[in-house]
Image (spheres, rainbow, N blue to C red):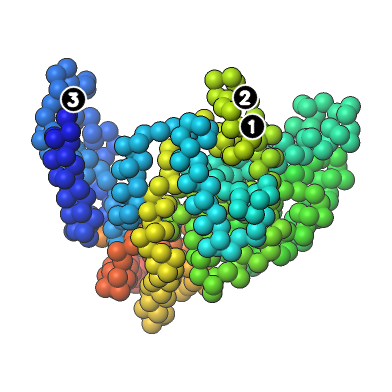
Amino acid sequence: MDSEQFGEAGRQMIDYVISYLENIRDRRVFPTVKPGFMRDLIPADAPEKPETWDAVFADIERVIMPGITHWHSPRFNAFFPTANSYPAILGDILSDAIGCIGFTWAASPSCTELEVVMMDWLGKMLKLPEEFLACSGGQGGGVIQGTASEATVVALLAAKSRRIRKIKEEHPEITNMDILSKLMCYASDQSHSGVERAAMLGSLNIRLIKSDKNFAMDAKILEETIRKDKADGLFPFYVVATLGTTPCCAFDDLTEIGPVCKREGVWMHVDAAYAGSAFVCPEFQHYMKGIELADSFNFNPHKWMLVNFDCSAMWIKNSAELVEAFNVDPLYLRHDKQGLVPDYRHWQIPLGRRFRALKLWFVLRLYGVEGVRAHIRLQVKQAKEFEDLMAKDERFEIAVPVRMGLVCLRLKGPNELSEKLLRRINDSGKIYVTPSKLRETFVIRFCVCASRTNSEDILYSWNVIKEYADEILAESTTNQDKK
Ligand SMILES: Cc1ncc(COP(=O)(O)O)c(C=O)c1O
């Protein structure tokens, strides 16, 4: 493909992307394909001779689209959102064209420098304490990770390294193996599975602390558990607090958990993967109270801040602790400006990294902070609209207070009714929702996800839910009559 052909194909692709996104409601949100479907649609081997762009382009609809779940359809009300915007797509196009691998400052200085500044912009938008920001001149700073799960692992490894150093200073006789078997992590029983996985990846023990009636981590139980573990000769070192849990968007109280971590000398990492974007709005800032007690903080602009996947923002108060945890320094990666600027290879697990700050820069400039706030507020309002529609139907109940863009609803009565309802809704392909279990209670999670969602879409989704509720409740009455 030469530059002329690229220009033509590029324009065709941009037109396709616009048409795809603007007409996305017309597509069935969840595909009907069966596992292995693609083998029948494409040859078993790569073509020996080059094909034409027209042939490739035609296969987007024939091969790819039948198996796509349309995450950016307003009919997609599952999981949490993943962001999508034209400015972010433009940023990714440029990033792909530059195609640099920014593992050190010298590997492509703009790649590192823009990221440092963008993370300061974002941190200031969220009103993070100065200590987290590179512009404060201290050891703090931000980095773009691929996912919140990676941020959890990276923070865990830094915390582990800090704790091992301290134990070694106090007890030089203890072996590394002995220390490793006694290191303990903690998170609430509502935390994301990625936290448990981070501990597994690090071959470390984790305790899931019981949540309270609001599904927030019980700080008292956390403190008692840490103290007991210490008394038993174990080494507590890492607590993950969650702001906006996956099952029901509950918020751990940092003003309670933070002081426990401080008293017990334990690293506090804060996972705000979804809800973190909302902290740009002053009315949601209160959820972050106590953030100054955290050692590290993370949220995903790629969830709710209009920046396409992947872009997970992480800050750390003392970046030296990351660098110390991961530093290997082969000659071929060294450069003569080392130490003057961050070399992000020390802040992450892989060596290679894409120029992800570009899409963040484009989004923040083209929307402005105001535009980002408007996006968040609109989706929160739409969740309320959905709640209001539901509140008028007394067959339904809200399982927990609606927070952010998430509504956890269920049919009154046994779990089986709501389980059946969820299956029926998803089988219809009209909208897509996901389940959650809040202790013994089964709930349907309805999340406002797509940035194109409007009030008509909310009404559409509610009508789909109602239609299948009518059906299921009628069947259940008939079955009872038969008995
Ligand atoms: C609270 C929370 N933490 C972490 C994650 C995982 O995010 P990621 O896919 O970026 O690892 C999620 C995903 O929804 C989440 O809700």
Q: Residue at x 62, y 64 (%)?
A: 288
Dividing the picture into quarters, in which one does residue 58 lie?
A: top left
Q: Residue at x 16, y 45 (%)?
A: 11
Q: Is residue 250 left or right of residue 322?
A: left
Q: Secondary structure at mark 1?
A: helix
Say whether residue 431 is visible: no
Dividing the picture into quarters, in which one does residue 185 lie?
A: top right
Disc 2 crowd, CA 10 A, few/some/many (<14, 14-19, 20+): few
Nearer the camera: disc 2 or disc 1:
2
Quarter of the image with the C terminus in it: bottom left
Determine the residue located farthest toward the top in the rendered image: 48
Mark found first going from the N terminus, 2 or 3: 3
Q: Distance between the Cα atoms at labels 2 and 3?
A: 45 Å
Q: Amino acid at mark 1?
A: Phe
Coordinates of residue 135 in the picture (x, y in percent) = 60, 53
| Residue 302, above or below 352 | below
Q: Are marks 2 and 1 in contact (CB under 8 Å)?
A: no
Report the disc number at residue 326.
Answer: 1
Mark found first going from the N terminus, 1 or 3: 3
The residue labelled by disc 2 is 329
The residue labelled by disc 3 is 43
Coordinates of residue 379 in the picture (x, y in percent) = 40, 69
Coordinates of residue 466 in the picture (x, y in percent) = 31, 71
Of residues 479 and 64, the one nearer the viewer is 64
Report the disc number at residue 440.
Answer: none
Q: Amino acid at mark 3?
A: Pro
Coordinates of residue 208 in the picture (x, y in percent) = 67, 50
Say whether residue 325 is visible: yes
| Residue 146, above or below 245 | above
